[in-house]
Amino acid sequence: MTIEDSRSVDSIVHDNRFAGEACNLLFSGISDMKQIIDRLEKAECLTRDEWILLLSGYRDEDRVYAAEKARRIAGHYFGNRIFIRGLIEFTGFCKNNCYYCGLRRENEKAQRYRLTEEEILSCCEQGYKLGFRTFVLQGGEDAWYTDARIEHIIRLIKGRWPDCALTLSIGEREEASYRLFYEAGADRYLLRHETGDRAHYGRLHPPEMSFDHRKDCLRALKKIGFQTGCGFMVGSPGQCAQTLAEDMLWIQELRPHMIGIGPFIPHQDTPFGQERAGDYQMTLFLLSLLRIMGKQVLLPATTALGTIHPEGREAGILAGANVVMPNLSPVSVRRKYAIYDHKLCMDAEAAEGLADLEKRLRQIGYETVSERGDWKGR
Ligand code: SAH
């Protein structure tokens, strides 16, 4: 049986969404995972059945095979150069109630804060001196930051550091708001889709949040002209090969410029406080597959990956990532932006953190560069 013949993997695994073992038995020796990975490299897409087969049936050797291929592709486009982004977590207020996130509005234990314009500018100032040429403004969905206030901050930052790229990560807004931000000078926008599977989206979010709206936002951002990033958590409650296949199919459709993935990590004061964290090796495997599929895509080794394993960031780069996003927020608020437990970068100053990070990257043969690091693909 060939891959093309395996039409109905969907129906086979339908009743057992974690059908890794079953798939292994069914297809071992029948479909070679390496063949599927080769096809992904060539076609830059797979069918739903192929994704399910690969994501439920892969073995250690396939992971290694994918990592080597991903690293070669990243090396071809980026050499040993790693882009750095200065992350400024400027508000801890959020009107949403996502079941996984420590900033959810019903978490009364969260210590809410908001940076002033002056504080945000001073983060940029410090970041610029350290060599950052991209600033990322990330926060909860905080209505205090009206469109006009965000627009004002964009103009201030872009006016003062016109050679820098500005990325926003402030959740869902109207298309007109996104347009306003783009016209004010923002260059990029990160909005993880969180899961490409409608039912799974409903398991991660309260009913008032809309799967369709999130996808519409991403389409709008891309249409407006932003370098656009989506992404998802690995190992979020209810995730399985089938839901991951939907993530990959959505990414194939959207063709984002950036993709942020990291393991799910429970936060004790959320409904998912007792759930298990996402799998480290699975995260690395997915990073490799995203590199193989997206070629020039901007792919960070995320803080969450660094949090679940002491060498997570390095391993992420060796699996195909080419971006790191050190924390530039003022030390006084860093602990408060707790989207999950034990989040890294709580105390280390950005300066110390960056020097340490650079040293660690040099040890695996990579160097950070002081550049905007824009998307250069087609
Ligand atoms: N409000 C913004 C920024 C959210 S924080 C927005 O909606 O885009 C950035 C990302 O952190 C989220 O998109 C989510 O994927 C991730 N995240 C949130 N809680 C997490 C957790 N418990 N474990 C791992 N990642 C988490």
Image (cartoon, grey):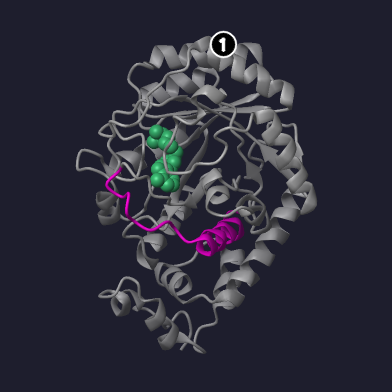
User: Would you say residue 193 is visible in this rendering?
Assistant: no
What's drawn in magenta, residue-wise?
A: 270-294
Image quarter for ligand 1 equals: top left
Crowding at dot 1, Cα within 10 Å, few <14 / some 14-19 / many 20+, comes out as: some
Q: Position of residue 126 (x, y in %)?
A: 67, 20
Quarter the C terminus occupies? top right
Residue highlighted by disc 1: 156
Question: Which residue is pictured at 48% across the width and 43% down the height?
Answer: 342
Image height of 150 relative to 238, above or below: above
Front residue of 277 and 347: 347
Which secondary structure dominates the residues rendered in magenta?
A: helix
Q: Position of residue 94 (x, y in %)?
A: 33, 28
Question: Which residue is pictured at 43% across the width and 44% down the height?
Answer: 341
Q: Is residue 45 left or right of residue 250?
A: right
Image height of 27 relative to 199, above or below: below
Question: Which residue is pictured at 56% across the width and 66% down the height?
Answer: 40
Q: Position of residue 249 (x, y in %)?
A: 42, 58
Question: Which residue is pictured at 40% across the width and 76% down the height?
Answer: 20
Image quarter of residue 165: top right
Amino acid on which disc 1 is placed: Leu
Ligand 1 neighbours mark 1 (CB distance < 8 Å): no
User: Would you say residue 303 is visible in this rendering?
Assistant: yes
